[in-house]
């Protein structure tokens, strides 16, 4: 399966992991599955770990499509962790598109520990 997730309700955190091959259909299916999970709360933060995705058939238009809908609260923090320059560029593109919708809490990282520190520094209060 190209995408999986786990929900840490205690920390108010969704950890999504992408695997190869990763497509637009995979990303949209992941979003829908998460949306319908009874443990999901839109106020949670999210770490999107794409460090194991080194290639993809995603295009710039696919990033725009993904950015059209968010299942997270505008106040949620979302960290995208990548390992390639192309993925970093796509992550920044996603971040900028979501900013156009008023979402300011998305950042792209190359280091999972830094992303986790940033996410947990503003974790959801219960």
Image (tube, rainbow, N blue to C red):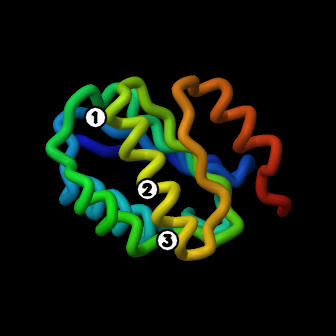
Number of the label disc, if any, that sits on residue 94: 2
Q: Would you place residue 16 above or below residue 96 in this image? A: above
Number of the label disc, if any, that sits on residue 19: 1
- In this picture, residue 16 sits left or right of residue 113: left
Provide residue 68's location: percent of width, then percent of height.
39, 74
Provide residue 75's location: percent of width, then percent of height.
71, 67
Tell me the quarter of the picture where residue 34 sits. Answer: bottom left
Q: Cα distance, mark 1 to mark 3?
A: 21 Å
Provide residue 45's location: percent of width, then percent of height.
64, 54
Q: Quadrant of the C terminus?
A: bottom right
Provide residue 112's location: percent of width, then percent of height.
58, 27
CB under 8 Å between callouts 1 and 2? no
CB under 8 Å between callouts 1 and 3? no
In the depicted view, which residue is nearer to us: 4 or 81? 81
Number of the label disc, if any, that sits on residue 51: none
Disc 3 designates what residue? 71
């Amino acid at each position: 399966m190209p995408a999986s997730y786990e929900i840490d309700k205690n920390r108010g955190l969704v950890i999504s992991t992408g695997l190869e091959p990763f497509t637009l259909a995979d990303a949209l299916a992941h979003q829908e599955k998460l949306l319908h999970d009874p443990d999901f709360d839109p106020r949670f933060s999210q770490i999107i770990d794409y460090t194991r995705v080194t290639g993809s058939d995603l295009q710039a238009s696919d990033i725009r499509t993904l950015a059209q809908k968010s299942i997270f609260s505008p106040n949620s923090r979302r960290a995208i962790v990548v390992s390639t320059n192309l993925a970093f560029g796509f992550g920044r593109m996603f971040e900028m598109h979501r900013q156009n919708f008023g979402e300011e809490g998305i950042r792209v990282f190359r280091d999972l520990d830094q992303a986790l520190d940033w996410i947990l520094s503003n974790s959801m209060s219960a």
